[in-house]
Image (cartoon, rainbow, N blue to C red):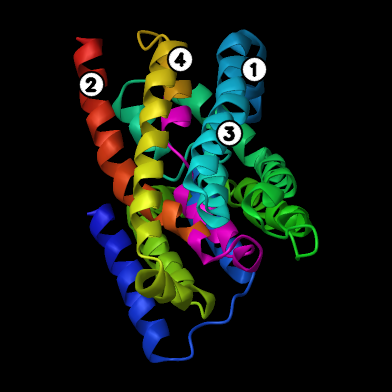
Amino acid sequence: MQLFLVLLGATLGLIYGYNTDGFIFSSKICLFAGLTLIMPSLFNVKLADVTLVWEYKIVLIKGLVLNYIILPLFAVGIGLLTQNFGIAAGLFLLSVLSGGGMVMHWIKKSGADTSLGFLILLINLLFVSLSLLMLHQFGLYTSEYFGESYADQVNIANFAQAVLMLLVVVPFLLSRVILFVKPLVKLIQEQRSKISSGSIFIILFYLFGLQNSQLLFNIYEFEPELIVISLAAVFAFYFLILVTARLVYDLNSPQERAAFWHSVTRYITLALVISTFSINTFGIAMILPIMFAYLIQIPFAIFIDKKLAVIKK
């Protein structure tokens, strides 16, 4: 169902933008994403869970090394092979955004440690600014290889503080306030799946309906090979994630299984929101790997869940 909504939202957004002047980007979409996709997850984050950091420090260190060193290196390697600055940047952005809107669903479904899962979710959200700064460094150090200019453009480093506020700080503070209104918390939790699905549809419709997103038609017309290259790059990236995460984590441990899910899934919707900031810097092709990640990650997660069910038996 979610894959259908993803395709429907993106398609309708492109059709709307193609037949109109399209939307003009507003940072309010970040706040909308923060309140509808991130805040509901934060209700279950308890400050007392911070003590788990020390208890499971080895698991957390594994996750940090994998998500912020190894996976970005994979993305750089594959990205350089694509010979396209935008595709490489989109893949790198995926590599530094761990977890995702459905990560807690997969953690619960696989019988992993949900308390540690929520703590890792919070840590990854706090690291959003680090992810943006890493993308900024990627642009600085690889632009010459691709023959592109980056330093002279309006770059992603300028948005790090705003994104942190809209996607992390405001949703977290509001979640602490709403926790005092128990009926509202209960209602949001009961309707969380519908809220998430509806939010993803609206965000995709809006982002693909942006004026800049219409440049995707130019890629289809003038550089169709980039579509094949991007799809192959995303497949290769997810394959490397799965192989490496399987070697790093002990899937018989509920705690390591929670960290495993935060590595094998990427925060795709957040990546799509952030990528809209930097289309003018990295090029419209940056959206391609993020688009294909939607098509790959959902079936990918279902496949992994089935494999974990076999391991648990």
Cα distance in 3D space between marks 4 and 2: 15 Å
- 90 w.r.t. 9: above or below: above
Q: Residue 2: which quarter of the image?
A: bottom left
Q: Residues within 10 Å of mark 3 (few under 14, many from 20)?
A: many
Judging from the image, what secondary structure is the residue with disc 1 in? Answer: helix
- Badge nearest the viewer, 2 or 3: 3
**Residue range of the region highlighted in magenta in the rendering:** 261-285
Looking at the image, tell me whether mark 2 or mark 1 is earlier in sequence order. 1
Foreground mark, 4 or 1? 4
Task: Name which residue type carries label 3.
Answer: Pro
- Circle 3 — which element? helix
Cα–Cα gap, marks 1 and 3: 23 Å
Mark 4 to mark 1: distance in Å?
Answer: 13 Å
Residue at 72% over, 60% down: 149
**Would you call the spot at circle 4 few (<14 residues within 10 Å), some (14-19), or many (20 or more)?**
many
Identify the secondary structure beneath mark 2.
Answer: helix
Which of these two is toward me, 310 or 278? 278
Residue 256 image offset from top left, x and y in percent: 45, 15
Identify the residue at image location x=33%, y=53%. Answer: 228
Rendering coords of residue 292 (x, y %): 36, 52
Residue where numbered disc 4 is placed: 256
Q: Which residue is mark 1?
A: 53
**Mark 4 touching mark 3, by CB under 8 A?**
no
Residue under numbered circle 3: 72
- Horizontally, residue 178 falls left or right of residue 223, namely right
Marking on residue 307: 2
In this rendering, does residue 181 appear at all? Answer: no
